[in-house]
Amino acid sequence: MATGKEQKITISSSTNMSKEEVEKAVQDAEKYAAEDKKKREEVDAKNEAENLCFSAEKVIKDAGDKIDEADKNDINQKIATLRETISGGNVDAIKLGTEDLQKAVYAVSEKLYKNQAGQANPADNTTPPAGDANGADGQVYDADFKDVDSDKKDGENK
């Protein structure tokens, strides 16, 4: 320090728990560990399901009229069912509903990509003729060459 005085900080625990209290806290933690794990699993399943519902709605909105009405209705129905299941709190049912909606969204996404690829690459099944446009018929010649123009320029600059 600039003042030249010595400074000290001492940190000490403010609670003095007895061994019995510490052991009781550890036992309580172990006792409720399974319950905490179950609750965490439920919260994670609900979050995953909500995120999937949001993503599915976004896919439908972004695709617009590129998705069949039947597919839109199917996904919207599955979203509604999953949201009802989420409010029920049954983890297994939420996971099944999430899986069902996920499959439906994947199927629609696959159709969208196939349609998009089909539009980008129109069906052109013609094969190019053998050989290149110059009629070389696929023959390749290995040759060395010398650029005469660059030699002249180098000679002029010297």
Image: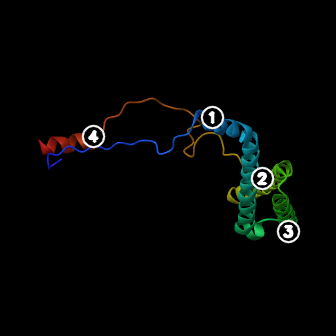
Q: Earlier in the sequence, mark 4 or mark 1?
A: 1
- Circle 3 crowding by C-alpha within 10 Å: few under 14, some 14–19, many from 20: few
Q: Residue furthest left?
A: 158
User: Where residue 121 sits in the image (x, y, percent)?
Assistant: 69, 55
- The answer to whether the residues at label 4 and label 1 have Cβ atoms under 8 Å apart is no
Which mark is drawn over residue 20? 1
Q: Residue at x 85, y 47 (%)?
A: 92
Q: Residue at x 18, y 41 (%)?
A: 154
Which residue has dot 2 on it?
106
Which residue has dot 4 on it?
148
Camera-nearest label, 1 or 2: 1
Q: Earlier in the sequence, mark 1 or mark 2?
A: 1
Residue type at numbered disc 3: Glu
SS under mark 1: helix
User: Where residue 37 sits in the image (x, y, percent)?
Assistant: 73, 43
> Looking at this view, is 114 or 119 the one in front?
114
Camera-nearest label, 3 or 4: 3
Q: Residue at x 70, y 46 (%)?
A: 127
What is the C-alpha distance between the residues marked 2 and 4? 61 Å
What is the C-alpha distance between the residues marked 3 and 4? 68 Å
SS under mark 3: helix
Residue type at numbered disc 2: Tyr
Camera-nearest label, 4 or 1: 1
Residue type at numbered disc 1: Glu
Which residue has dot 3 on it?
69
Residue type at numbered disc 4: Val
What is the C-alpha distance between the residues marked 1 and 2? 55 Å
Q: Earlier in the sequence, mark 2 or mark 3?
A: 3
User: Which of the 4 image quadrants contains residue 49?
Assistant: bottom right
Q: Earlier in the sequence, mark 3 or mark 4?
A: 3
